Image (cartoon, helix red, strand yellow):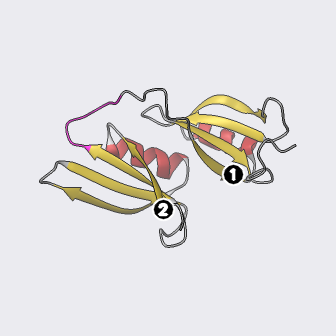
Amino acid sequence: MRLLHTMLRVGDLQRSIDFYTQVLGMQLLRQSENEEYKYTLAFLGYGDESENTVLELTYNWGTDSYDLGNAFGHLAIEVDDVYQACDQIRAAGGQITREPGPVKGGTTEIAFVRDPDGYAIELIASKFAGQGLGQ
């Protein structure tokens, strides 16, 4: 078994595709429309779906926003250098919501970004990825 994708509902599909491709450097892998049920799907990621977990963006036609609720936490993306990644994201118009630095209670270097729909994205320095708090 393996994790295939995570799905997020978005209010403006093109705005979200632009954010994930132009700000976070993902590739649009495929996109499809379902006219009968009035939705469009876009799959994005850092590599082919056959080998990588990807992000599915779902746009339900006519819905421009969602209540994010309080159960969803965040997506996490590994980056080589969290400080440099934040500089690049900020320069591309992205919103940094937690400046880069060590996680409280540990040494893992992280930062947080918000996508156009308000979803939180954690950036984790690759030297710490998969190590918990990096202790």
For mark 1, give the secondary structure: strand
- Give percent across and percent down for residue 86: 67, 39
Residue drawn where x is 19% and y is 56% of the image: 34
Quarter-wise, where is residue 32 in the image? Answer: bottom left
- Count every numbered label the image shows and give the total: 2
The answer, for residue 27, to whether it is visible in the render is no
- Horizontal side, residue 27 vs residue 134: left or right: left
Is 19 magenta? The answer is no
Q: Which residue is mark 2?
A: 4
Mark with earlier residue (1, 2): 2
Magenta segment range? 60-66
The answer, for residue 119, to whether it is visible in the render is yes
Task: Name the amino acid, label 2.
Answer: Leu
Q: What is the C-alpha distance between the residues marked 1 and 2?
A: 20 Å
Q: Which residue is mark 1?
A: 79
Around disc 1, counting alpha carbons within 10 Å, would you say few (fewer than 14), some (14 to 19), or many (20 or more)? some
